[in-house]
């Protein structure tokens, strides 16, 4: 399978969201990544249901929703109703992760689990057979435009080894500081889904930037 690209709308121009979503529609992007932040799990607040619903009406790409919130189980049904196709929760935010993942799948969404950069990959051992995707954060979540954390490559390698050893088929996604210069190395390390915000939206042509990530072999 060739890798997928999921541009992160957090870095778009919020005064021109429709314009930027239309650019993503015209591009080779596979999904559209939406970052939900609650000001508690991460030191920033982004946007909520009404924005997700509005984006859903314009986006032709499946919505890849990344929840950086505490108690995500309270909001699974609301995100399903708002139009999420993939719903990712943080391992660190879930006491009953198995229940949360099952709930996401029961609502017809793909279930993702995300790890902060310091959380051992091994922590996921007993959830891997139930998930559709693992999101390894490659920055500390909360903001766009941060520097990629170098030891992420060993984390990707370790997760890939666990996937192979267990015969699992979840996707490996990375998020944070992804750009053309590290995308090739990430894909070689075993990444299936690249999330990129600043690289795609902060300079130049959105469609070209997405194409440049998609064309990496
Ligand atoms: C960070 C978010 C990311 C963010 C990535 O907490 O989860 O999705 O938008 O932004 P860049 O690509 O600029 O690092
Ligand atoms: Zn994200």
Image (spheres, grey):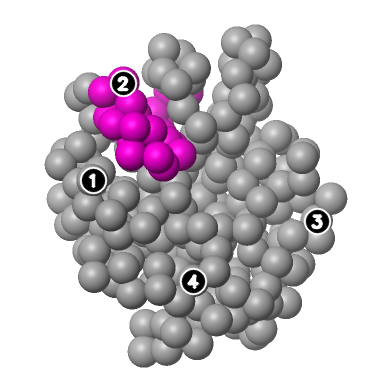
Instruction: Indicate the position of residue 129 as horizontal and vertical percent values.
Output: 49, 17
Q: Which of marks 4 and 1 is nearer the N terminus?
A: 4
Q: Earlier in the sequence, mark 2 or mark 1?
A: 1
* Residue 148: numbered disc: none
- Mark 1, Cα crowd under 10 Å, few <14 / some 14-19 / many 20+, is some
Does residue 65 lie above or below 104 as drawn?
A: below
Gap between marks 3 and 4 measured at Cα: 24 Å
Q: Earlier in the sequence, mark 3 or mark 4?
A: 4
Gap between marks 2 and 1 measured at Cα: 16 Å
Residue lying at 59% horizontally and 74% vertically, measured from the top left: 25
Q: Residue beneath label 4, please?
A: 59
Q: Which of marks 2 and 4 is nearer the N terminus?
A: 4
Q: Residue beneath label 3, please?
A: 216
Residue lying at 73% horizontally and 43% vertically, measured from the top left: 187
Q: Earlier in the sequence, mark 1 or mark 3?
A: 1
Does residue 141 lie above or below 11 as drawn?
A: above
* Residue 98: numbered disc: 2
Span colored in magenta: 97-121
For the residue labelled by badge 3, is the local secondary structure a helix, a strand or a loop?
loop
Single out the mark in the foreground, 2 or 1. Answer: 1
């Amino acid at each position: 399978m060739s890798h997928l690209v999921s541009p992160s709308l957090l870095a778009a121009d919020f005064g021109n969201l429709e314009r930027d979503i239309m650019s993503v529609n015209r591009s080779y992007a596979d999904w559209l990544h939406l970052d939900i932040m609650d000001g508690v799990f991460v030191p920033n607040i982004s946007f909520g249901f009404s924005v997700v619903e509005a984006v859903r009406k314009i986006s032709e790409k499946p919505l890849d929703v990344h929840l950086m919130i505490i108690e995500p189980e309270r909001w699974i049904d609301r995100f399903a109703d708002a139009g999420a196709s993939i719903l990712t929760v943080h391992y660190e935010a879930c006491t009953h992760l198995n229940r949360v993942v099952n709930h996401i799948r029961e609502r017809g969404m793909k279930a993702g689990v995300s790890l902060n950069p310091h959380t051992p990959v091994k922590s996921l051992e007993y959830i891997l057979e139930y998930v559709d995707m693992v999101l390894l954060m490659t920055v500390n979540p909360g903001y766009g435009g941060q520097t990629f954390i170098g030891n992420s490559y060993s984390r990707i390698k370790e997760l890939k080894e666990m996937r192979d050893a267990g015969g699992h088929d979840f996707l490996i996604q990375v998020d944070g500081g992804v750009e053309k210069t590290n995308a090739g190395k990430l894909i070689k390390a075993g990444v299936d889904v690249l999330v990129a915000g600043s690289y795609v939206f902060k300079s130049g042509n959105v469609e070209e930037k997405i194409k440049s990530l998609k064309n990496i072999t």
